[in-house]
Image (cartoon, helix red, strand yellow):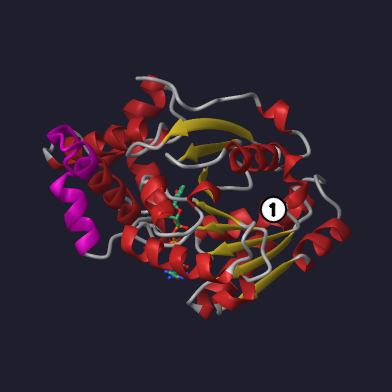
Amino acid sequence: MADSISIAQPTHFIGKSAVIQTVGVVGAGQMGSGIAQVMAHHASLKVVVQDVNPQGLSKAAATVEKSLSKFVEKSQITHEQKAHILARIQYETELEALKDADLVVEAIVENEAVKKDVFQTLDALLKPAAILASNTSSISITRLAAATQRPGQVIGMHFMNPVPLMKLVEIIRGAQTSDATYAVVADLTARLNKTGVVSRDFPGFISNRVLMPLINEAIFTLYEGIGSAEDIDTVLKLGMNHPMGPLTLADFIGLDTCLAIMNVLHDGFQDPRFRPCPLLKQYVDAGYLGRKSGRGFFTYS
Ligand SMILES: NC(=O)c1ccc[n+]([C@@H]2O[C@H](COP(=O)([O-])OP(=O)(O)OC[C@H]3O[C@@H](n4cnc5c(N)ncnc54)[C@H](O)[C@@H]3O)[C@@H](O)[C@H]2O)c1
């Protein structure tokens, strides 16, 4: 495939993210809370987190507090640093509270129509220079960008779960993402103490193009009665040295998110090898969403 994208090393971008002073995070779920935390902690940025659900906001505040307390227990930060990080994060229910942000990272439900709606609203609200990033696991950055009047300033910033611990950020350049936008996000990623990789904008990017079919196949293996959930996970853990079995990982990611990603791969490539397993669909229909709902392939108290 012809290469029209310049993929330079992050070291070329040092200092470029100084233009970012305030970050908005839309969606205070398991990803949004972690993104807010690392922005306030490692980059010392002011963060405004917005969610339509006030309970989600209180849960996010508690999650950030608990996570930082673990860093204090391990002597990685002091009580005082923890207090400073917490003070930099503000929680809001109205999107208008993000109007002064230089960068907004969207981390709401993995649904293209809902994300486009938020992107359109943010585009009208934010200052012209602001960058719009999505933490989407699989949805086209190019299509989200097309919902705005600033496609050059739209980019994928795909964090991994749990955000405070995982070292990777997959940076996705849409067809129109500018070099300047990429430079800012690559530099910010380095400031967050994470390694950035660049992916072209095709369904599932690199991470979920590879991971999600593995998880889906593990679900088919369970569905077809080839092995128990425990044994399937044990094979991948002890046999392939994976730190976590694929069904445990699916529960951790959220089965609704896994299904949404498989649907994006299936629709995007029109290839039957990406068809979601019927058992995954049934679990989502039943509300078995994994860890966040207390039950998925395993149960959680
Ligand atoms: N869970 C993972 O392991 C993982 C990893 C990487 C990326 N992602 C991606 O991150 C995004 C969020 O995933 P999550 O696991 O945090 O989901 P989640 O269900 O934990 O949280 C989503 C949050 O978004 C809020 N929300 C929904 N619609 C909204 C709107 N219109 N405006 C504001 N808030 C809204 C919900 O109230 C909820 O708090 C998805 O795009 C997902 O694909 C998830």
142 to the left or right of 259:
right
Q: Quadrant of residue 248?
A: top left
Which residue type carries mark 1?
Met
Q: 265 or 215, which lies in front?
A: 265
277 lies above or below 111: above
Q: Residues within 10 Å of mark 1 (few under 14, many from 20)?
A: many
Q: Dominant secondary structure of the magenta stretch? A: helix
* Residue 100 included in the magenta stretch of the image: no
Q: Quadrant of the C terminus?
A: bottom left
Judging by the rendered image, the residue that carries numbered circle 1 is 39
Q: Quadrant of the N terminus?
A: top left
Q: Position of residue 138 (x, y in %)?
A: 37, 45
x, y percent for residue 224:
11, 38
Asked whether residue 214 appears in the rendered view, the answer is yes
Frontmost residue, 241 versus 43 = 43
Between 49 and 99, the residue placed more toward the observer is 99
Q: Residue at x 69, y 36 (%)?
A: 190
In terms of image quarters, where does ligand 1 lie? bottom left
Query: Percent x, y for residue 238?
Result: 40, 24
Foreground pick, 255 / 208: 208
Residue drawn 85% across the image and 56% down it: 81
Image: magenta residue range: 266-285
Q: Is residue 248 left or right of residue 49?
A: left
Q: Is residue 275 magenta?
A: yes
Question: Looking at the picture, does residue 20 appear above or below residue 12?
Answer: below
Q: Secondary structure at mark 1?
A: helix
Residue 76: x %, y % from top left = 80, 45
